[in-house]
Amino acid sequence: AAPVTPPRPAWAQASVLLAMVALFPIYGRHLANHAPADSPLANLTVPAGWQPVKALTDWEPHWAGMDDVRILHVSQGPDQVMVYLAWYGTQRQGAELINSQNQLVPEKHEIWRKTRDFSRLIPLADGELPIRQAFLDSYSTGQHLLVWYWNRIGGSDTTNIFKAKLMLAWRKLTGQSDAGAGLIIAAPYVENPKEAEAILLRFVKDMRPIANSVIDKGAQ
């Protein structure tokens, strides 16, 4: 079973809420006008053992306002993965990493539907990676996709939108970059999503050091 993150104590949630209330009026003024950091995504390379291939799906996430995006389709033997990286060089109105418009599949989409979406932790050699895991189905082609997605901010990974907003606000208010990126990977499967899960896990282990290095250097 997928590891489940336990709920925070009430006092911890209240502390986060109070900090957000205190910081956001100040941070909101920053969102009005600030030049974004240059995108580093051109430096992203395919990890060893994986090869670029033609598009494995017509699906793309509906992310909004990013300053740059990099889409890759790669394979290792018969195993295929789609990679979508959205770069936000700074947080500003209409171009925010944490945005309700950022959706894997918009409501009432003509081709795709999302059947499940939940948080889990992926065990890796250097710790656990927090992700959202989603299952997508295509009405027209019958294709099934397993999707993992998360955000990277200030050298840390998170799927918690409240924590992410607080991190971004705090970094800017302390004179640090508030650049960040959304990372989305997907693998197709026929019947058993465990097959796609094994592919994504192997790919994350290979790709994460490269992606983290590119994103973190761009956000310095």
Image (cartoon, helix red, strand yellow):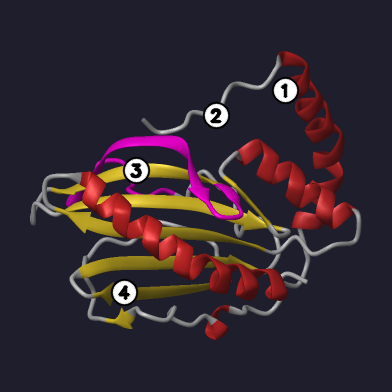
Amino acid of disc 4: His
- For this orientation, the residue located farthest to the right is 174
- Image mark for residue 73: 4
Q: Nearer the viewer, residue 61 or 120?
A: 120
Residue 13: mark: 1
Q: Tell me which amino acid carries mark 1.
A: Gln
Residue 89 place in picture, x, y as percent: 67, 69
Q: Is residue 119 left or right of residue 134?
A: right
Q: Secondary structure at mark 2?
A: loop
Q: Please name the residue shown 35% across and 57% down the image.
A: 200
Name the residue: 72% across, 14% down.
10
Question: Hey, which quadrant is residue 83 in on the image?
Answer: bottom left
Marks 4 and 3, Cα distance to the nearest angstrom?
Answer: 19 Å
- Residue, disc 3: 134
Q: Which amino acid, by three-letter code, is at mark 2?
A: Thr
Looking at the rendered structure, the secondary structure element under dot 4 is strand
Quadrant in the picture for the N terminus: top left
From this viewpoint, is residue 81 visible? yes
Farthest front residue?
125
Q: Amino acid at mark 3?
A: Ala
Residue beneath label 2, please?
A: 5
